[in-house]
Amino acid sequence: MVYSLFSLTVSNSISEEYGVNFNEKRIELGIEPLTGNWTLDSIALQPPIAGIMCFPSTWRTTSEYRFLEDKRYCQYWSNRNTDTLKPYHKNKRIYFTKSYWVWKNEITLEYDTYINPNSELAEYEELEVSIHWWSKEIYGHLAHMKNGEDLLIDFEPNRSMYGFKKSKVERILTEWNLK
């Protein structure tokens, strides 16, 4: 009974922990922190099956999970102060697990989306940076977008399934004057 009360309290505060309170760890890894310019738009419950979705839905409830099963959530943050005429950091999605077993609460993934509206190849370029918290690895994927669709322009023949490594992410952000 005591553990249940303790577990519930910790689990309910876990979503706050991975927001602004997690900035120190983001800065240590070289990840953009959440500042006063950011707004938490939603915290969405993920379906129990595998998938990465970050938009709230009325049909998803915790009852879809089995008793004491770890529940996966996503925070969707948007940048309020953006000048969309030059490269900008558009949004951040933070994926985490809430568990009855306190030691299993964890942040798993974080995605940052950057937009460059000044692309020569398409309407805009979209750089999605993923941070895999279990391995502390950072990967990037650059898409050239036209009418909201990726043009599948690929100048990197040796990319891994996750995209390219942190060094290229840093180079692109520097070229876009975002670092």
Image (cartoon, grey):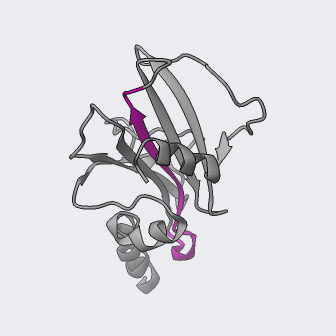
Q: Is residue 138 above or below residue 21?
A: above
Q: Give the x, y percent position of residue 76.
A: 35, 47
Residue at image position (56%, 47%) is: 171
Q: Give the x, y percent position of residue 36.
A: 22, 60
Q: Give the x, y percent position of residue 121.
A: 50, 18
Q: Nearer the viewer, residue 55 or 84?
A: 84
Q: Nearer the viewer, residue 5 or 125?
A: 125
Q: Nearer the viewer, residue 80 or 87?
A: 87
Q: Is residue 118 above or below residue 93?
A: above
Residue at image position (67%, 41%) is: 162
**Left or right position of 178 against 41:** right
Question: Is residue 104 found inside the magenta-colored segment of the image?
Answer: yes
Q: Give the x, y percent position of residue 167.
A: 63, 52
Q: Name the residue at the top extreme.
A: 147
**Left or right position of 155 against 69:** right
Q: Name the residue at the right extreme.
A: 158
Q: Quadrant of the N terminus?
A: bottom left
Q: Quadrant of the C terminus?
A: bottom left
**Left or right position of 72 against 43:** right
Question: Is residue 21 found inside the magenta-colored segment of the image?
Answer: no
Per the rendered image, the range of residues in magenta is 100-118
